[in-house]
Image: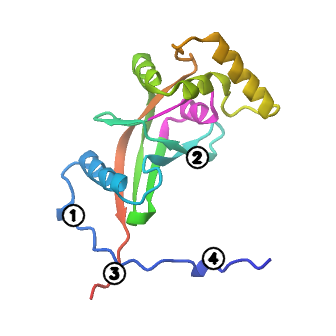
Amino acid sequence: MTSPDYARIRLGYNAEPLLEGDLAPHPMAQFEAWFAQALTADVIEPNAMTLATIDPDGKAAARTVLLKGLDARGFQFATNYSSAKAADIDAHSSVALVFTWLPLSRQVCIRGTATKAPREESAAYFATRPRGHQLGAWASQQSQVIANREALQENYATFDAQFDQNVPLPDNWGIFIVRPDTVEFWQAASLIWV
């Protein structure tokens, strides 16, 4: 098999330049404007963001999580507090987020500090999740090796039988809030306009 010529894989950009005068006065307002555009454009999961963390040994790790909320405090995502990402945040609360909206030739890079949301907020969000997702939070021990798919399905069935319509918030599950220190907006555009 012949390897592709990675250096030659690129797109030409014809978008208009991103000018300071076109931006909202506050980064969160600008993010919300771009997010609204991503929602109406041909962007798959516009709320998907890459979360970069530093593990207890000082090594970087990255994975995709979903934005679950945004307010004056920052960007919110939900996870198992026993996961590798949560252990990383416990060790080093400095994180980075990247939203990549390729159809719009845009990305937003955020650096900030992650902290756990109050339990009441996590419980309020958890209550809005579909039952299957709620049971999945109980059944799946994130970042842990599982014997096989059948073991995971059995664990899921156990919790499905245990809980009636109201699935409680697991003790080891909740929301992190990333309070931004910097927010960088990038839009691809040609340096030459005709």
- Tell me where residue 95 appears, x and y as whole percent: 48, 42
- Tell me where residue 15 appears, x and y as whole percent: 32, 74
Task: Report which residue position mark 1 lands on.
Answer: 20
Can residue 15 be spotted in the picture?
yes
Give how far apart the Cα atoms at labels 4 and 1 are: 33 Å
Mark closer to the chain start, 2 or 4: 4
Q: Nearer the viewer, residue 190 or 69?
A: 69
Task: Report which residue position mark 3 lands on.
Answer: 191
Check whether the beta carbons of the residues at disc 2 and disc 1 lie within 8 A of each other.
Answer: no
Q: Residue furthest right?
A: 147
Q: Residue at x 62, y 21 (%)?
A: 138
Instruction: Give the crowd class for mark 1: few <14, some 14-19, many >=20 residues within 10 Å.
Output: few
Give how far apart the Cα atoms at labels 2 and 1 are: 31 Å
Mark closer to the chain start, 4 or 1: 4
Instruction: Give the crowd class for mark 2: few <14, some 14-19, many >=20 residues within 10 Å.
Output: few
- Tell me where residue 188 appears, x and y as whole percent: 38, 70
Q: Which residues are magenta?
A: 77-94
Instruction: Give the crowd class for mark 4: few <14, some 14-19, many >=20 residues within 10 Å.
Output: few
Mark 2 lies on a secondary structure that is strand
Q: Amino acid at mark 1?
A: Glu
Q: Which mark is residue 63?
A: 2
Instruction: Give the crowd class for mark 3: few <14, some 14-19, many >=20 residues within 10 Å.
Output: few
Task: Report which residue position mark 4 lands on.
Answer: 6
Give how far apart the Cα atoms at labels 2 and 4 are: 23 Å
Q: Amino acid at mark 2?
A: Arg
